[in-house]
């Protein structure tokens, strides 16, 4: 068999096929969809309604984003696009506060991404 490690190598293809099979057998995609809609969405929408700095929450399954804004009405971003240094400090502070509480999040400009493992339980998510 031919192929490079990054272009269709048979071992990588076998691993991908096995992963897809496990996802199907264990209902991982359906479970993520259910937990996302029934647990994550309501919790994040409640968070948004209580905080004027949240412009929007959006997501699918267990991949969610919280948009942080200076003004909910105008949706002016809390951090400007490509903001760095002092401009990025407000979101950096949110990330640091999350980390201090044991929550690892990914920030991208004015968005905080909440992406738990697909195997998380509803109880652990909350």
Image (cartoon, grey):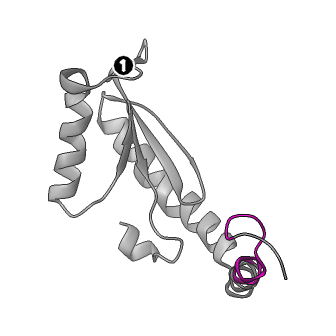
Q: Quadrant of the C terminus?
A: bottom left
Residue 104 drawn at (x, y percent): 30, 58
Is 54 displayed left or right of 13 in the figure?
Answer: left
Q: Mark 1 sits on what residue?
A: 80
Is 118 displayed left or right of 24 in the figure?
Answer: left
Q: Quadrant of the N terminus?
A: bottom right
Q: Is residue 22 magenta?
A: no
Residue at the outermost right position: 1
Front-lying residue, 5 or 29:
5
Residue 14 drawn at (x, y percent): 76, 84
Front-lying residue, 23 or 70:
23
Q: For the point 21% across and 26% down, which residue is it? A: 85
- In the depicted structure, whether residue 36 falls above or below residue 69: below
Q: For the point 69% across and 71% down, which residue is it? A: 30
Residue 84 drawn at (x, y percent): 28, 25
Front-lying residue, 99 or 56:
99
| Region rendered in magenta | 5-16
């Amino acid at each position: 068999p031919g192929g490079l490690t990054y272009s269709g190598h048979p071992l990588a293809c076998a691993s991908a096929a096995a992963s897809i099979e496990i996802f199907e057998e264990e209902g991982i995609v359906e479970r993520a969809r259910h937990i996302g809609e029934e647990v994550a969405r309501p919790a994040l929408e409640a968070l948004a309604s209580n905080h004027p700095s949240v412009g929007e929450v959006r997501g699918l399954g267990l991949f969610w984003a919280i948009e942080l804004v200076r003004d909910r009405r105008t949706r002016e971003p809390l951090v400007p696009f490509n903001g760095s240094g002092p401009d990025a400090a407000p979101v950096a502070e949110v990330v640091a506060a999350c980390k201090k509480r044991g929550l690892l999040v990914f920030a991208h400009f004015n968005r905080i991404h909440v992406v738990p493992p697909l195997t998380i339980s509803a109880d652990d998510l909350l």
